[in-house]
Image (cartoon, grey):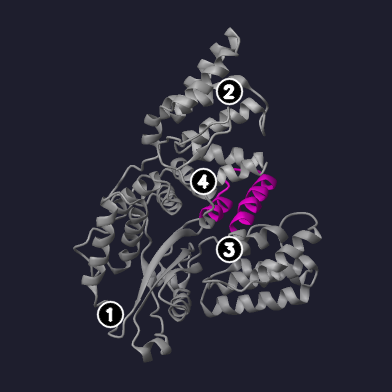
Amino acid sequence: MKRTFLGMMLILAGAALPAQANFDKAMEAYTAGNFTEAYRSFDALAAIGDYSSAFNIGVMYYRGEYVERDPVEAWAWMQLAGSESDTENMLLTAEKVFSGLSVAQQQAAKARLDALLDSYSTEVLSTELAPVLLSDDECDVDRTPVSKKQPRYPQTALRKGQFGRVVVEYSVMPGGHVRDVAVVQSSGEDFSQAAGESALYYRYEPMPLAQPTGGYKTAISFSMHGKIDNKQGLVAELQEWRDKAEAGDGLAQYVYAYRLGVFRSFQHYMKDVNLEYQTANRWYLESAKQGIPHAQYEIGRNMIAGRGCEADAEGGMKWISAAAVAGLPEAQQYLASSPGAMPEEERRAHAIRWLKNAAANGHYFSGLLLAWELVSGPGQITQEELSHAEKLVAAEPVNYFDKVRILETEAAVAAARGDFPRAQRLQKKAVKIADRLEWDLRDVHHRMEAYKRKEKWVGPYYYDIELEPTPLQASAQ
C-alpha cells in the first residue's frame, strides 16, 4: 500500500506492526486541512503500531499543525517510527531534524524517545494488543437464555420452498429482556423482518448489572423441516473459510472468526466443532493486524467484555478506535457510547462527533442516538440541531426493530420543539409496546410524566434500569 508522509516530500511504502488500510482515512482528513481530526486519527493508529502515523505525528509537531511547534517532540516521534519500522527515509528525515537541535534539546529528545518506546515499541505493542486467551469456562460472560421465540416462516418464502438464515445482534438489559435488535446478516428482507420481530421477545437470565450488555449475536435458521438439518453444510462452510484464513487472507480470517461466533447459536447441533470465543479471537487478531476494520472492532469488543480472554478495556479500545478511524460506523457508535469518565459537556461533544460520522456513513441506529443527543442536552437547543434531529427520526428504519426506542426518540424531538401533545402520544405508543413485550422500563414512564409537565427530556436514554425482582426473574431463578 502506498503511503504519503507529510515531511520532506516523502512518498513511499510505510512499515508497521499491522498493515493499516485505515491510514488513508487519516490522510484524507489531513489533506482536507482538518488537522484536529488528522491528529486524532494518527494518534489512534500509532497506538496499534502504525508507524507511518507515528511519523506523521512527528511532522505535525515539526510544522505546528494542530499542536504547538516542538522540534524535540517531532524528532522523538520520527525516530520512533523510523527505528521501529526500519524505514531508511524516515530515519534520514529524523536525522536532519536532530542536527538542528541544540545539545540540551538533543538530550531532551532522546529522553522523550525512550518514553515513547515504553509505550509504542513493536515489542510492547505485540504484547499489549494481543488478548490473553481463556476458555469459555474460564471467562463465562454469556448470560443464559431463558426463552427465545420461534419466528414465523415468511409465507412467500415458504411457498417457494426457500430456506434462510439471519443473524441478529442486540443488547440484553439487567432484567433479561433485549433492546436495540438489529439484523446484521440476512438471506432476504422477509427473513429479516420475521427474525427481528421474534428477537424482541427473547429473555435472558436477569443479572444485577447497572448497564445493558451489548454484542449478543444469534443465528436464526429458517428450515421447512423445523430444525437444523444441514450440519454438514455448516461444517463445510467453516472449513472453506478456515482454509483461506490459514493461507493468510485477512478478510477470510475475519469471516471465519465471525462465523465461529454466529454458529455458537447451533452449538447443540455442532458439538464436535470448536466454537469457543478464544478460537475466534485468534483469527480476529490475525485479521486485525492486517488492517481489517471489522476484525479490529470485533477483537476490541471481545477484549473489553472479556469474551474468550481476560478483560482488557485499554487494549480493546485501541483496536476499536482504529476501526472508527477507518470509518466503520459500528466502531464509531461504540466510541460514542463509551466515553469513559468525561465531564458531561465533554462527553456530549465526544458522542455527537462520532455519531455524526457514523450516521453520515448510513448507520441508522447511530442516527437515532444522534437525534437523542441533540435534543436531550441541557440548555436551549438551536434551530439547526432541532432540524437535524427531526430529519434523523424521519428516516426509514434499516434493519432495526426496537420500535420503543424509535418512538421515544421521536417523542423527545417533539418535546424539544415544544409540541408536548405529540410527545405524549408518541410516548404512550412506546409504553403500550413495552407493556405488550413485558419489558420493565420505568424510564418510559418518567419521560411521560415530564412531557405532561411540558418539560423536554434532559439526560441519557437509559435513566432508571435498576434491577428489581419480577415474576419473570423469579421463574428464571
The quarter of the rendered structure image containing the N terminus is: top left
User: Which numbered disc, 2 or 4, marks the residue that appears first in the sequence?
Assistant: 2
User: Which numbered disc, 1 or 3, marks the residue that appears first in the sequence?
Assistant: 1
Residue 42, position in %: x, y?
55, 38
In the image, what residue occupies the spot 57% across and 18% down?
97
Report which residue position mark 4 lands on.
321
- The residues bearing labels 1 and 4 have C-alpha atoms spaced at a distance of 40 Å
User: Which numbered disc, 2 or 3, marks the residue that appears first in the sequence?
Assistant: 2
- The residues bearing labels 1 and 3 have C-alpha atoms spaced at a distance of 35 Å
Q: Residue furthest top?
A: 103
In the image, what residue occupies the spot 65% across and 70% down?
408
- Span highlighted in magenta in the image: 331-358
Instruction: For the residues labelled 4 and 3, say whether their Cβ atoms are less than 8 Å apart.
Output: no
Instruction: For the residues labelled 2 and 3, say whether their Cβ atoms are less than 8 Å apart.
Output: no
Q: Is residue 344 magenta?
A: yes
Q: Is residue 244 magenta?
A: no
User: Which numbered disc, 4 or 3, marks the residue that appears first in the sequence?
Assistant: 4
Horizontal placement of 289 versus 320: left or right? left
In the image, what residue occupies the spot 37% across and 54% down?
251
Q: Amino acid at mark 3?
A: Gly
Label 1: few (<14), some (14–19) or many (≥20) C-alpha neighbours in 10 Å: few
State the residue in front, 111 or 458: 111
Instruction: For the residues labelled 1 and 4, say whether their Cβ atoms are less than 8 Å apart.
Output: no
Horizontal placement of 257 versus 365: left or right? left
Number of the label disc, if any, that sits on residue 149: none
Report which residue position mark 3 lands on.
362
In the image, what residue occupies the spot 43% across and 64% down?
206
Q: Name the quadrant containing residue 311.
A: top left
The answer, for residue 116, to whether it is visible in the render is no
Residue 417, position in %: x, y?
79, 67
- The residues bearing labels 2 and 3 have C-alpha atoms spaced at a distance of 38 Å
